[in-house]
Amino acid sequence: MAALIPAHLDHLVVTVPDLPAAVAEIERATGVRAVPGGRHPGRGTANFLIGLAPVGWTGGAHTYLEILGPDPEQEAPADGTLPLDAHLATVPTLRTWAIHPPAMAATLAAARAAGIDVGEVRDMSRETAEGNLLAWQLTTRSPLPQEGIQPFLIDWGDSIHPAEAALPSLDLLEFVVESPDVGATRALLEVLGTGDTEVVAGPERRLRARLRGPGVELRF
């Protein structure tokens, strides 16, 4: 039976301490080289992207892997913190994930009514490697809620989704949320509209994923 992949999964975020080194390491492991996504001016980070092809997925949307780390061409923010807790990475870590609910405003309202702290809603933008402007809206909170197992919400509006840019691709074989309180985590994800996520018991809050390149697997 194919692993259950959430229908509204937008992307997975792997944070790394050294962006060029992580891109090279993932290429050695999978045979697939990530492509530059872009820089986040004033926030100290840049990213590289790999498309994801979820095996057995019934979702109609796109998804991808974001490799996020310190931008070698930017100074770090004065307080030392980076978006999505990327400053905490000592090794490549599956830090968090994003979902794209079909009705973001309604999902936000439901989350707030249920007492779920999604943080603030921000308008974001960056230039792509080709020089095009990409703009989106997302929820953000620092530190990450639920240590990253609670997804942030994203709405790309009229922008072309990054996964539509003919990215090199890996198969997404499995995505799992681990939690010491499975019931509470499932209830939270249900409110956020991603109750089809696989949640299993574990001693700590963490995310797991299995990716497949040409004949090899990569696990986070």
Image (cartoon, rainbow, N blue to C red):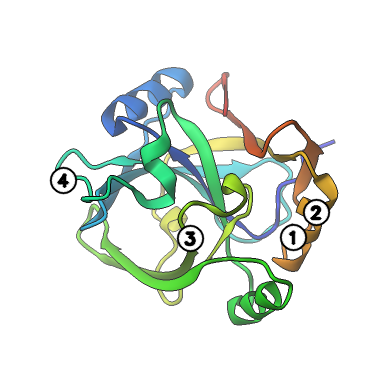
Residue at which label 1 appears: 188
Q: Quadrant of the C terminus?
A: top right
What secondary structure is marked by label 2? Answer: helix
Q: Position of residue 78 (x, y in %)?
A: 21, 50
Does label 3 or label 4 sit earlier along the sequence? 4
The part of the image, by quadrant, that contains residue 67 is top left
**Badge 4 amino acid:** Glu
Q: Is residue 205 left or right of residue 124?
A: right
**Badge 2 amino acid:** Ala
Q: Is residue 30 visible?
A: yes
Q: Is residue 155 visible?
A: no
Mark 1, other Cα within 10 Å: few <14 / some 14–19 / many ≥20: some
**Residue depicted at 41% across the width and 36% down the height:** 88
Q: In the rendered view, would you say 179 is above or below 113?
A: above
Q: Are marks 2 and 1 in contact (CB under 8 Å)?
A: yes
Q: Give the label on residue 184, or none.
A: 2
Residue at which label 3 appears: 141
Count the marks: how many?
Answer: 4
Between the C-alphas of marks 3 and 4, the distance is: 22 Å
Q: In the rendered view, would you say 125 is above or below 178?
A: below
Between the C-alphas of marks 3 and 1, the distance is: 16 Å
Q: Quadrant of the N terminus?
A: top right
**Residue depicted at 43% across the width and 45% down the height:** 85
Q: Position of residue 211 (x, y in %)?
A: 59, 31
Q: Position of residue 46 (x, y in %)?
A: 28, 47
Residue at which label 4 appears: 75
**Residue depicted at 77% across the width and 39% down the height:** 180
Q: Give the label on residue 105, or none.
A: none
Q: Are marks 4 and 2 in contact (CB under 8 Å)?
A: no
